[in-house]
Structures are given as C-alpha cells and as structure tokens.
Amino acid sequence: MVRAFKKPDLKGPRFREKSVKVLSMDLYKRFKLKYPEHDISFEEFKKIIQTYNENLYNGIIEYRDGVELPESLGYMFIGSCPALTKRINVDYKKSAQYGVVTQHRNWDSDNKTMKIFFTNQLVKYRVQNKQIWMLVPGREFKRTASKMYIEDYNKYMVVNNNKKISMLFKMHLDALREKMKANKIASEDYNEFDL
C-alpha cells in the first residue's frame, strides 16, 4: 500500500525547548573560585573539557564492552538492536522527493539499529537518586558512533529489545564469578614441582 506524503510546512510556527549549556562562563567562574592556582583562560578551559569528552566517546566507540565512567557514575556502551517493526522509520528527504512515504531500512547494517546505552545499576558506590539519572549523548558523539557502526556493526554486543541493561551486566558478572571459582579449584590441585 502506497501512502501519499504530506510535505511539512517549513515556515510554520515551531516549539523549541529551552536548552541549558553546562559548559558556560558561570561554570568557569566557579572553577576559578574553587581552584585559584590554575591560571587558564575560558577557551583553554573549554578545550580541556571538550578533549576529555572526545576521548571518552572515542573509547566507547572503540571498545566493544564500553567504558566505566569516572567516579563510578555508571557504564556506557554501544549495542546492536534488531529493528523495531512496530514503528515506521520515515525517510523524510526521500519522501518529499518522491511524494510517497519511504522508510529507512538500515541496509548497511543488516537491518540492525545502533543504540547508546547508559546504566548505573551495578556501580561500586551507592549514588543517591540513581534511578532518576539520565545521560544524553551529544551530537558529535552520535554522528561519529553512527559512522563507525556502519563500518563494523558486528563488533558490538547484540541487545534484545525486551531485556533490561542491568540484567545484562548482572549475567556478565555472574559468568565472571563462575570462571573465577573454576580457576580457583584448578589452582589448588596444581603442583609446579610435579613433572
């Protein structure tokens, strides 16, 4: 069934959410008050934070298991999910070009979708109100991860749509504990002088 595509009104009114920039002059002033021994300009301050964030998201992209965030804030990794069949993923550019609704099919990744996951369920230290924490990846991170995912989508962990990420980590830790038990039992029988 071919549905006609209704072009959006590009000059119509828009609702824009107010965004808050964390990396602001206010943060820089608070940093200078707390650490007066560091004599750096605002541009250097921004460059240091941006470089750190870039290294962090490159680590998440490069390593299959993701990374543990500093200060035990949680874990981030990229997962490969099967495509959802419930919702239509409309390709608006092609739909406007051809006049009918067309969909993205993810042919580059065997119809799999990349998702960036964050969990703080199994961190070492108790974090107050950890159930309301959320992490929203930045635009550069999402775009870079998307490009790298298309190149090597089989590298990433397959995550089912109906499983909690915290359960995935719990299963991984349980398997690791079992391996450690098996190694301990084998090491008690070992005699290095018995040839």
Image (cartoon, rainbow, N blue to C red):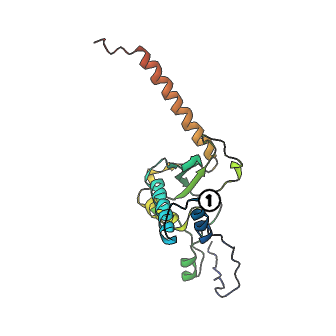
Outermost residue on the bottom side: it is 11
Q: Position of residue 37 (x, y in %)?
A: 51, 60
Residue 144 percent location from the top left of the image: 46, 64
Identity of the residue furthest to the front in this view: 37
Callout 1: helix, strand or loop? loop
- Residue 174 sits in quarter: top right
Assess disc 1: are there few (<14), some (14-19) or many (≥20) residues with their C-alpha within 10 Å of its C-alpha. Answer: few
Q: Is residue 152 left or right of residue 167?
A: left
In this figure, what is the number of numbered marks? 1
**Residue sitting nearer the eye, 113 or 183:** 183
| Residue at image coords 57%, 37% | 171
Choose between 29 and 155: the one closer to the eye: 29
Q: Which image quarter is the N terminus in?
A: bottom right
- From the top left corner, tell me how far across and down residue 59 is, in percent: 45, 54
Kindly identify the amino acid type of the residue bearing the numbered disc 1.
Thr
Q: Residue furthest top?
A: 194
Task: Choose top left, top right, bottom left or bottom right for residue 55.
Answer: bottom left
User: Does residue 181 lie above or below 64 as drawn?
Assistant: above
Q: Is the residue 178 above or below the residue 42 in the image? A: above
For the residue pair 182 and 52, the one nearer the viewer reads as 52
In the image: residue 162, left or right of residue 63: right
Task: Determine the residue positioned at 55% across, 78% down.
Answer: 93
Q: Tell me: 64 left or right of 121.
A: left
Q: Position of residue 56 (x, y in %)?
A: 48, 56
Q: Is residue 5 above or below residue 56?
A: below
* Residue 72 in sight: yes
Question: Residue 116: which quarter of the image?
Answer: bottom right
Vertical order, 90 against 178 (above or below): below
Looking at this view, is 53 or 6 the one in front? 53
Quarter of the rendering occupied by the C terminus: top left
Q: Which residue position is annotated with label 1? A: 85
